[in-house]
Image (spheres, rainbow, N blue to C red):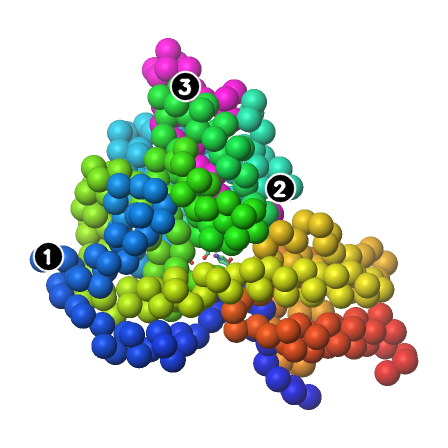
């Protein structure tokens, strides 16, 4: 019997707030292909300033933001990018950097904390003398926070060290910062400091910030000019985008301060889940808004069975694998939703583990 609906599938599931809808309805707009949409300009200028970069560009999605950044950095045929084997760009973007961008991926193992071993990064850089046979390394990509590592944060110091490697070898550094604001709030470090070493960053407005659509990429003025042309080539040149950017401006104002509460609710949920028999959660690894709930061997639990059972209570989650469920907190999840979820998981686990008792 569904008592209420709690959508923990992702922080991409939020609905625009009334304030966002109002701003969208009254947004000042113009054709952003023929000129500049004034509201888009405002958002882009605000984001460039926050990130400490020269310029910014609104793009329809984080996937397109990453693709554009990789393609601009790797515009020479035979380019190679070093990135994590568990990175969103490598796992969830349909191989776009290769199939569309013609860029060769060189993956390195992501550590549990979302980093890549620094020595392994340096060892993966191609020797320019081998260019007869090998692709040429041109870019290193990081992801902060790291989604497939459970929303783990990369420190500014680690990012700087990767930036030093890139500079030493004449490479560029891109950060997939889909949830960069979550990292900033969790670490207590301003976003511009987290990305100081980066040549480009893609930041999602449509995740924890709760905007309905879009991402923003930032970089140098010349980089963004190339990115704008490529956005058009990829079909991302849009007209009165102020309607979308107005919602993003509201999201920055209203929801950025709320991210800290998302993290607190994630911790509360993680601690409660970890008390349940048959369930294990690495509570210390819950640094931001994501929780990985693992089913213990011999518990009779599987991610498929448990997620299906939770649906009957109105709890929506996505299995990460056969014995792991991912839960993502966002600003439209209340503390009461967290307590309801805990109670439903407890009942669902008991029903699966001890069917005879029910
Ligand atoms: C880490 C990360 N990067 C990029 C993306 C892509 O963003 P979009 O879904 O807007 O394409 C996502 C998820 O959506 C993500 O989790
Ligand atoms: C699944 C993935 O593409 C999305 N970014 C999410 O974290 O929900």
Q: Earlier in the sequence, mark 3 or mark 1?
A: 1
The quadrant of the picture occupied by the N terminus is bottom right
Ligand 1 under 8 Å from disc 2 Cβ: no
- Above/below status of 75 relative to 30: above
* Quarter assignment of residue 85: top right
The residue lying at 28 percent from left, 64 percent from top is 245
Ligand 1 under 8 Å from disc 3 Cβ: no
The quadrant of the picture occupied by the C terminus is bottom right
Q: In x, y percent, where is residue 41?
A: 21, 57
Q: Earlier in the sequence, mark 2 or mark 3?
A: 2
Q: Residue furthest right?
A: 357
Start and end of the magenta stretch? 121-150
Write down the residue under mark 1: 35
* Quarter assignment of residue 75: top left
In space, the residues marked 2 and 1 are separated at their CA atoms by 43 Å
Secondary structure of the residue carrying tag 3 is helix
The residue lying at 34 percent from left, 35 percent from top is 199
In magenta stretch: residue 185: no
Q: In x, y percent, where is residue 107?
A: 50, 34
- Above/below status of 340 relative to 70: below
Q: Which of marks 2 and 1 is nearer the N terminus?
A: 1
Q: In x, y percent, where is residue 200?
A: 35, 40
Write down the residue under mark 3: 168
Q: Which mark is residue 340?
A: none
Query: Crowdedness of circle 2 by 10 Å Cα count: few (<14), some, many (20+)?
Result: some
In space, the residues marked 3 and 1 are separated at their CA atoms by 39 Å
Write down the residue under mark 2: 113
Q: Which of 97 and 336 is in front in this view?
A: 336
Q: Is residue 3 toward the left or the right of residue 199 in the image?
A: right
| Residue 39 seen in the current view | yes
């Amino acid at each position: 019997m569904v008592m209420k609906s709690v959508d923990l599938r992702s922080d991409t599931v939020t609905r625009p707030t009334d304030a966002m809808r109002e701003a969208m309805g009254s947004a000042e707009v113009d054709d952003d292909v023929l000129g500049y949409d004034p509201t888009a300009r405002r958002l882009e200028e605000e984001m460039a300033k926050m990130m400490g970069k020269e310029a910014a560009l609104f793009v329809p999605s984080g996937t397109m933001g990453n693709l554009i950044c990789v393609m601009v950095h790797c515009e020479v045929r035979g380019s190679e990018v070093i990135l994590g084997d568990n990175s969103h760009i490598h796992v969830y973007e349909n191989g776009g950097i290769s199939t569309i961008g013609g860029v060769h991926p060189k993956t390195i193992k992501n550590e549990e904390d979302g980093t890549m071993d620094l020595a392994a990064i340096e060892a993966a850089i191609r020797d320019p003398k081998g260019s007869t046979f090998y692709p040429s390394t041109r870019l290193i990509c990081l992801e902060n926070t790291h989604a497939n590592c459970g929303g783990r944060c990369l420190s500014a110091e680690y990012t700087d060290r990767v930036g030093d490697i890139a500079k030493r070898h004449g490479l560029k550094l891109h950060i997939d910062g889909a949830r960069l604001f979550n990292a900033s709030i969790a670490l207590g470090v301003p976003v511009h400091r987290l990305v100081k070493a980066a040549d480009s960053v893609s930041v999602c407005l449509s995740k924890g910030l709760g905007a309905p659509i879009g991402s923003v990429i930032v970089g140098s003025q010349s980089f963004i000019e190339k990115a704008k042309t490529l956005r058009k080539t990829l079909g991302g040149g849009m007209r009165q985008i102020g309607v979308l950017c107005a919602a993003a401006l509201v999201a920055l104002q209203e929801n950025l301060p709320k991210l800290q509460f998302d993290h607190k609710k994630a911790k509360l949920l993680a601690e409660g889940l970890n008390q349940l028999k048959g369930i294990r959660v690495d509570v210390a690894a819950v640094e931001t808004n994501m929780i990985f709930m693992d089913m213990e061997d011999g518990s009779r639990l599987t991610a498929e069975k448990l997620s299906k059972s939770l649906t009957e209570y109105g709890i929506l989650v996505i299995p990460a694998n056969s014995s792991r469920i991912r839960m993502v907190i966002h600003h439209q999840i209340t503390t009461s939703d967290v307590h309801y979820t805990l109670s439903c998981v407890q009942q669902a686990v008991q029903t699966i583990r001890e069917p005879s008792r029910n």
